Image: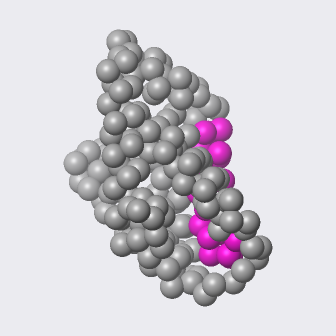
Amino acid sequence: MLVLVAGLLIFFGVHLSTRARDNRARLIARFGEGPYKVAYSAISTLALVLIVLGWRSAPFIEIWSPPGWTRHATITLMLPAFILLAAAYLPGHIRAKAKHPMLAALKLWAAAHLVSNGDLASIILFGSFLAYGVVDRIMLKRAGRGEVRAPQKASWGADVMAVVIGTAAYLLFGIYLHPLLIGVPAIRV
């Protein structure tokens, strides 16, 4: 459980530190933008590895027993989460309407998994990410970045691509990567 908590603290610490624009600017000025991004990515990746390893090795301590239907709710909610994630990188109407589609995807992912997982490690993992998503969104709004300006030319084609890419990623992750990385089948074919 300590590895999970350490990974979460590192991950959120690194991500929340970028909200302190002065510190970020000083680090970029001192080391350069490229090395800063490499270090940021390396620390984030290390944190994600610790989170996955910590969650997988945590003892199963059941807090509540989710009803069977919650698994279907999670599987259903993950499709729009993947589409929102893809839309974050494409200049379409979905990105414009969602304002912060990556944060929306993160919150949807976390909430969906909280519904179907009643063990302590899962509650810590998904609850932490949900809380982070809410706090980060509030911080962005207070910093005057609450709404991302609509792309100059929001494209329906970009939305179609977001749906296609998001659906493909949803299927790939659900069928192949979730069992491999997480150790639990998400979608059974």
Determine the residue located farthest toward the top in the rendered image: 153
Q: Position of residue 23 (x, y in %)?
A: 45, 47
Q: Where is residue 14 in the image (x, y as percent from the top left)?
A: 46, 57
Q: Position of residue 32 (x, y in %)?
A: 24, 47
Image-quadrant location for residue 82: top left
Is 171 situated left or right of 142 in this image? left
Residue drawn at 61 percent across, 87 percent down: 59
Say whether residue 127 is visible.
no
Count of labels shown? 0
Residue drawn at 68 percent across, 59 percent down: 69
123 in the magenta segment: yes
Say whether residue 188 is visible.
yes
Q: Quadrant of the C terminus?
A: bottom left
Determine the residue located farthest toward the front in the rendered image: 189
Q: Quadrant of the N terminus?
A: bottom right
- Using the image as rendered, state which of residue 166 and residue 11 is in the foreground: 166
- Using the image as rendered, state which of residue 47 and residue 22 is in the foreground: 47
- Using the image as rendered, state which of residue 93 and residue 152 is in the foreground: 93
Residue drawn at 62 percent across, 70 percent down: 122
Judge whether 165 appears above or below 130 on screen: above
Q: Position of residue 91 (x, y in %)?
A: 36, 24
Query: How has the structure been colored for display?
Result: one colour
Judge whether 23 appears above or below 2 on screen: above
**Which residues are the magenta region?**
118-139
The dominant secondary structure in magenta is helix
Residue drawn at 45 percent across, 20 percent down: 93
Judge whether 26 appears above or below 143 on screen: below
Image-quadrant location for residue 176: bottom left
